[in-house]
Amino acid sequence: MSAAEQVLATALALNVSGINRGTAGNVSVRQGEGFLITPTGMAYDACTAEDMVFVSFAGEAQGRRKPSSEWRFHRDIYQARNEAGAIVHAHSPFAVSLACQGYAIPSFNYMVARFGGADVRCAGYATFGTQELSDRIVEALVGRSACLMAHHGMVVFGRDLATALAQAIELETLCEQFWRVLALGQPRLLPDEEMARVLARFADYGRQK
């Protein structure tokens, strides 16, 4: 399967999973001196691999379609984080609900550490597609592999498309769990020292001998 086919398959899988709908969100994969990204304003089930767009790190697009309006934060994440091989952005219901309140996800559950720290931050709001939004996302991702986006959604990166997709689904699950905890009252959080132990254990989580 080509890189473009993998990007499209991941975008379709986002919708099948229920964490994205319609033309919302976008998917990209690092490729050489740039990245392949889903096109703007097209339903994924109406796309073919040829509709995926290559964007160079200089911001120049190549292809028969225009790139996602959010191409800037994809570019900036790849340039800021060498370990990022693929990026998923979704307008998933529970992530959006928390982000519209400006909530970060605190250490209510040890699995928060899967994203690199004791919390998942919420990037401040800025108009979609702008450099200001990209700058705020990159800042929120310092030391993390995911963040919420105020009044917008979520963004997650991974070493490859499969990892980024799995992490996006996992983040939406945490968002739903936290949303339900908030309905019960003040969340009870794990202490910093426990989260430090969990982060240390996650350093080699999932690695095989």
Image: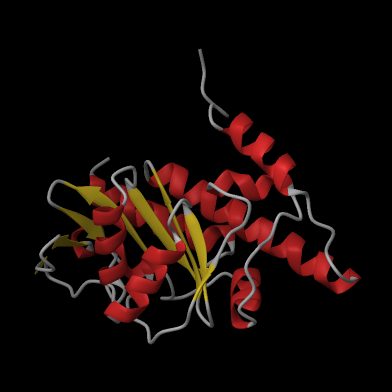
User: Of residues 145 and 197, which is closer to you in this image?
Assistant: 197
79 with respect to 202 (left or right): left
Q: Position of residue 34 (x, y in %)?
A: 16, 55
Residue 35 showing in the rendered view? yes
Q: Position of residue 207 (x, y in %)?
A: 51, 23
- Hey, which quadrant is residue 126 in on the image? bottom left
Residue drawn at the location 23% of the way across and 43% of the way down: 2
Residue 129 showing in the rendered view? no
- Hey, which quadrant is residue 171 in on the image? bottom right
Farthest residue in the front direction?
A: 193
Q: Position of residue 194 (x, y in %)?
A: 74, 40
Residue drawn at the location 60% of the way across and 32% of the way down: 200
Q: Position of residue 181 (x, y in %)?
A: 83, 65
Residue drawn at the location 61% of the way across and 38% of the way down: 199
Residue 5, compared with residue 58, is above or below; it is above
User: Of residues 153 and 140, which is closer to you in this image?
Assistant: 140
- Hey, which quadrant is residue 137 in on the image? bottom left
Residue drawn at the location 42% of the way across and 70% of the way down: 25
